[in-house]
Image (spheres, rainbow, N blue to C red):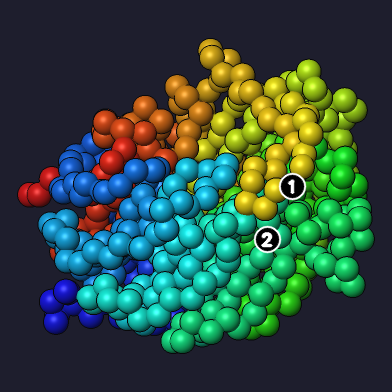
Amino acid sequence: VLPATLQAQVSYQRIVDAGRDPGSWLTYSGDYRGLRYSRLRQITPANVHGLRPVWVYQVHGAGSLETTPLVVDDVMYVTEKQGEVSALDLHSGRPLWRWEPSLPREVRTLGFDRTNRGIALLGQTVYVGTLDGRLVALDAKSGAPRWEVPVADNTLGYAITGAPLALKDRVIVGVSGGEAGIRGFLDAYDPATGDRLWRFWTIPAPGEAGNESWSGDSWKTGGGSTWVTGSYDPELNLLYWGVGNPGPDWNGDSRAGDNLYTCSLLALDAATGTLRWHFQFTPHDTHDWDATEIPLLIDARIDGRARKLVAMANRNGFYYLLDRGTGEFILGVPYARQTWASGLDEHGRPLVRTGIEPTAEGNLLYPSLQGATNWFSPSYSPETGLFYVSVREMSSRYFKGEAEYTPGGFFAGGGEAEIGGDSAFGAVRALEARTGAMQWEFRLQSPPWSGVMVTAGGVLFGGSTEGNFYALDARSGKPLWDFQTGGLIGANPISFLIGGRQHVAIAAGEAVFVFGLRGP
């Protein structure tokens, strides 16, 4: 149990004002805008070489460690591989309490590893999703369960792997399971009681707008999972959430049409769940190019006019700018190698090349199944005006096969084979946010699974599949520091204060590492 002096009190307004509280990390992306930008300045390009490990916490269980910890009031909250939640003393890493979900013997995780990417905090409550499809509320000071509600049926392939998003009077949670022929949705729950307040189905039923983009009854098994945390604009009261691939993945014969709202960005009224606008990046996707990447809410001048924008580096290889009030397409340019489209039209719809569909023999294409980027977070610095993204330069051979739906079974209609070897590599790329033009690139030996975080001190942090946690100069991309953690890094960095001193943390291998500058 937390000491009485540790309050763990996170109000909605505190999250709205996260920029005034840079010593904490209050929500999945650091703030509602999704920027993964820390306003802390103590760590700089001049002194970052002095970073050293302060403490290390070893996690439990089997699966992938992809958590983003939250930090508030001298406590770090960490989710472990199968959704366990641990509260750690921020100064030492000592466990204060630990909660473990009671999971059935058989849990269906089709197309993804057992993992959990994080929690949400609101008031004195921790909210976490489980692999078997429940949303659970825990007392932040003791870990005692307050309530739990079933969100979806895991026997049909649904699961929860993403971190919820806590707003003023509702907790938003999405679902995984796009490879199981689910019908995806996004939910809102009452933070105090767990009552469901609204549900938005990402695959519209007959009579709903968008259903005409599905042939026959294909909408019933249309996919459209919502498995990565979205962003939020408190002034517009709009949620921005990405939607995954249609089902079956690689055989689109049975689902003629654009297949809304798969591979789309949704702007939903947070109060009602009503769709305000949508933008589809990859109509009738047959390559598993989810649009579940983090949408970043930025402000910039476009053609001399101040605009409120959504920026997204999409899995399909294009970087997009949209108006976040209307969804108007403003810009779309490639940021990685792609061979499936000759460009985008004036409305942002891809000009698809001929002969790019999966075949029985296999069709070679860039980007790979994992995309030019994936679920891991990009970052944006208002100081540099740069959008930073981890990039995977890899192709795949896409195969088409028969698709027969079985409840809870793999519903893919084919497969793919990565073309890796010496031709595959990774990079962190800094794009001018207003134009998408690449300003610098830092090459990585292998395609990455780690996101990035930039600080007001001018340092960008990221990780590699080989286990290196590294720091780059945010303006030039010059490498400044690295630390070998000993395990694959498939998570996102954060920054916060301990005793008034800036620290950074990353989940790597089987542990969470915390780093700080050497003392005087």
10 Å neighbourhood of mark 1: few (<14), some, or many (≥20)? some
Which amino acid, by three-letter code, is at mark 2? Gly
Instruction: Specify whether 429 is left or right of 277.
Output: left
Task: Give me the disc on residue 458.
Answer: none
Q: Which residue is mark 1?
A: 405
Residue in the image at 77% along x and 42% along y: 404
Residue 18 x, y percent position in the rendering: 41, 71
Instruction: Specify whether 467 is left or right of 282.
Output: left
Q: Which residue is mark 2?
A: 184
**Of pointers 1 and 2, the one earlier in the residue sequence:** 2
Between 4 and 494, the one lying in front of the other is: 4
Residue 135 x, y percent position in the rendering: 47, 70
**Vertical relation: 404 (above or below) 38:** above
Q: Quadrant of the N terminus?
A: bottom left
Instruction: Specify whether 195 is left or right of 398.
Output: left
Q: Is residue 459 visible in this depiction of the protein? A: no
Residue in the image at 60% along x and 72% along y: 187
* Front tag of 1 and 2: 1
**Vertical relation: 334 (above or below) 69:** above
Residue 56 x, y percent position in the rendering: 19, 47
Residue in the image at 66% along x and 65% along y: 185
Between 186 and 132, the one lying in front of the other is: 132
**Cβ–Cβ below 8 Å for labels 1 and 2?**
no
Residue 392 x, y percent position in the rendering: 56, 31
Where disc 2 sits, the SS reads loop
Q: Is residue 280 visible in this depiction of the protein? A: yes
**Vertical relation: 422 (above or below) 460:** above
Instruction: Specify whether 71 is left or right of 183.
Output: left
Which amino acid, by three-letter code, is at mark 1? Tyr
Where disc 1 sits, the SS reads loop
